[in-house]
Amino acid sequence: MKKWRYSTQAEIKLHDFVTYAGQRARVVFIADTGEFSDEFKNEAEGNFFKTGIGLKMDDATLFHLDEIDEDLKLLRRKKTP
């Protein structure tokens, strides 16, 4: 199972708040580990994405990345209760 990492080598986690190419986004799935946010459960069940990560941009656009580059930067982790 592939572990996705930022260029800093920190592990990418579901619900991370990030910037990609200068735009704010949130990690909504990590297909390789089978982690999907609730809003993308249908994609998980249909095996639509088999690899890569999904970013939901602030303007609601979905980006699917199958490789990581230096444009992806961690802003902060989602706070857990």
Image (cartoon, grey):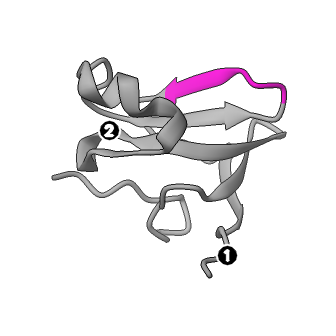
Q: Is residue 40 magenta?
A: no
Q: Residue at x 60, y 78 (%)?
A: 80
Tell me the crowding category of disc 2: few under 14, some 14 to 19, or many 20 or more residues within 10 angstroms, Cα based: many
Q: Which residues are magenta?
A: 59-64
Secondary structure state at the residue bearing disc 2: helix
11 and 77: which one is in front? 77
> Which is in the foreground here, disc 1 or disc 2?
1
Q: Is residue 63 left or right of residue 73?
A: left
* Residue 81 percent location from the top left of the image: 62, 82
Query: What's the amino acid at mark 1?
Result: Lys
71 and 45: which one is in front? 45
- Classify 24 as above or below 1: above
Q: Residue at x 66, y 33 (%)?
A: 56
Q: Is residue 61 magenta?
A: yes
Secondary structure state at the residue bearing disc 1: loop
Q: Name the mark on residue 48.
A: none
- Classify 12 as above or below 44: below
Q: Is residue 43 left or right of residue 32?
A: right
Residue designated by label 1: 79
Q: Residue at x 49, y 71 (%)?
A: 10
